[in-house]
Amino acid sequence: MSNNPKRKPNRIPKYDYSQIGAYFITICTKDMKHLFGHIVGAASCRPHTLLSNTGKIIENEINTLSTTYETLTVDCYIIMPNHIHLLVSIHGSIGRQDAAPTLSRAIGMFKRAVSIKSKTSPWQKGFHDHVIRNDRAYQKIWQYIENNPYTWVEDRYYTQEGS
């Protein structure tokens, strides 16, 4: 018998993650290491992440998600030093049976592509998702993503490393 803690499932049981809707995704680095870049000008009115090479690969892969999966769009995203946030929408089938990927499949392929292109796996296992249920929640999450660099020091994923 293993002494490792049992991971709790992070998906809604029996929920169809290929159905039309919006999803808030967070993917973290392994051990919360700052691998994607660092925040520049956190105290200024225009903070941003200065991307590392891995961060640039991530940005490129985020921008190709919509062309890889025709029914999926990335509406908003932010690449932080040790995590990324994505606001993803799934728009439904375009007539082909395999056209609507599950969220897990799309994110898994995204993580794999980044790992192959960066020649390392920067990711922690899995990812966090939140099903967005209405326009108000969608707007609130959009604002959270947009403001993430401004609130980096207060962020739940903030660590001192490389800041």
Image (tube, rainbow, N blue to C red):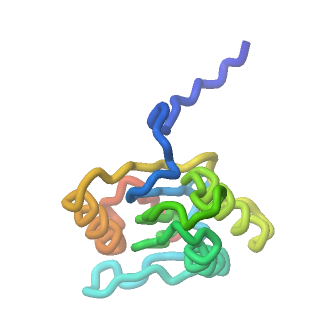
- x and y, in percent, of residue 7 in the image: 56, 30
Q: In front here: 138 or 41?
A: 138
- x and y, in percent, of residue 91 in the image: 45, 64
- x and y, in percent, of residue 84 in the image: 49, 65
Q: In front here: 138 or 102?
A: 102
Question: On the image, which quarter does residue 103 sit in?
Answer: bottom right
Q: In front here: 138 or 99?
A: 99
**Is any part of residue 104 visible from this angle?**
yes
Q: Residue at x 61, y 59 (%)?
A: 106
Q: Is residue 9 left or right of residue 132?
A: right
Q: Residue at x 66, y 61 (%)?
A: 111
Q: Is residue 123 left or right of residue 118?
A: left
Question: On the image, which quarter does residue 78 sit in?
Answer: bottom left
Q: Residue at x 63, y 46 (%)?
A: 125
Q: Residue at x 55, y 67 (%)?
A: 94
**Is any part of residue 52 visible from this angle?**
no
Question: On the image, which quarter does residue 151 sit in?
Answer: bottom left
Q: Is residue 99 left or right of residue 43?
A: right
Is residue 45 shown above or below 99? below
Q: How many marks?
A: 0
Q: Is residue 37 left or right of residue 112?
A: left
Is residue 50 shown above or below 161? below
Instruction: Name the quadrant of the N terminus.
Output: top right
Q: Residue placed farthest to the left in the image?
A: 136
- x and y, in percent, of residue 135 in the image: 23, 61
Q: Residue placed farthest to the front in the image?
A: 95
